Image (cartoon, grey):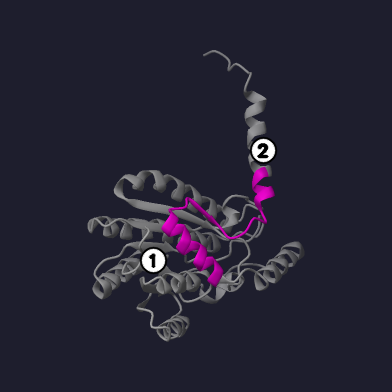
Amino acid sequence: MKDLAGKTAFVTGGASGIGLGIASALAQAGVKVMLCDIEQGALDKALAGLRATNADVAGVVADVSLKDELRKAAQATLDTYGDVHILVNNAGVGGGGSYGAWTDASWDWTIGVNLMGVIWGVEIFGPLIERHGQGGHIVNTASIAGLISGSGNAYNVTKYGVVSLSEGLRAELAPRNIGVSVLCPGFIRTRIVDSARNRPDRFPDQQQVRPSAEAEWLETVRARVETGIDPRYVGDLVREGIEGDWPYIFTDAEFEPVVDARFAMIKQGFDRIRDRTPPAG
């Protein structure tokens, strides 16, 4: 999508962090933006800030882990702007705990927001983008953790799922004039570590006292996030990625060697069996 001016975007998790950075960058490019977020106070603040720059923005409160709320948010977008051209499935939470500290509620919450929210966003908004015949673009926020597992917690599992979903949709939707990008950010200055502030009551936190190693790791992550990349820069990258139809949008090259090492291990697996002949019958 080379000419974004006048188009309409729907951005989940749009009241803060990466979502707000993307919404700001798109609004500066002349895009009409519907911000969707679970936090009413944060949403009001974000809208006021953007409107002070003469941005054409509106807001809707929704929990993306509830499909009916996403449907209502889609209708609110249509009622406000008529069409939608850009979908940014950005809402996400950090959670799940490491092996030995898993709970059903934590898995359900993390999968519900990080993966099902993205799936339902595509399911609901995809046809709305198709119907006007002007083409469009979908950006799904995964994480660099969607390419390097690190651990087997729910967050990483969902982000791998978002990468796979996006790669498959890119080929499937290209003939329909819809581009698909997957955003794989590194450490960005967001409140991802404090996601539990928005954890719905239907996902009770049954987490026991964290093992000392996990607690220490969490504080390391918090420190990296607090000194991470400015979300506004990420927003500019996403805008450029939409305009250029990038398959992958990275925020930095810090983890490139780790990704290379992962693929080297995969190749080694193929090397081990390349010259072997499977047993007959």
Residue 261, picture quadrant: top right
Toward the viewer: 245 or 125?
A: 245
Toward the viewer: 139 or 222?
A: 139
State whether residue 91 is above or below residue 246: below
Mark 1 is on which residue type?
Answer: Leu
Farthest residue in the front direction? 3
Is residue 113 among what the camera can see?
A: no
**Residue 125 drawn at (x, y percent):** 32, 60
Q: Which residue is mark 2?
A: 264
Q: Point out the stretch of residues depicted in magenta.
A: 232-260
State whether residue 134 is above or below residue 171: below
Q: Which residue is mark 1?
A: 66
Residue 244, picture quadrant: bottom left
Is residue 251 part of the magenta span, yes or no? Answer: yes
| Distance between the alpha carbons at the discs numbered 2 and 1 | 39 Å
Is most of the magenta stretch helix, strand or loop?
Answer: helix
**Residue 173 drawn at (x, y percent):** 35, 48
Mark 2 is on which residue type?
Answer: Ala
**Could you classify mark 1 by the number of other residues whose Cα lies within 10 Å: few (under 14), some (14-19), or many (20 or more)?**
some
Image marks 2 and 1: residues in contact by CB distance under 8 Å? no
Is residue 11 part of the magenta span, yes or no? Answer: no
Residue drawn at x 76%, y 62% is 213
Residue drawn at x 38%, y 66% is 66
Q: Earlier in the sequence, mark 2 or mark 1?
A: 1
As drawn, the label of residue 58 is none
| Label 2 element class | helix
Residue drawn at x 59%, y 50% is 147
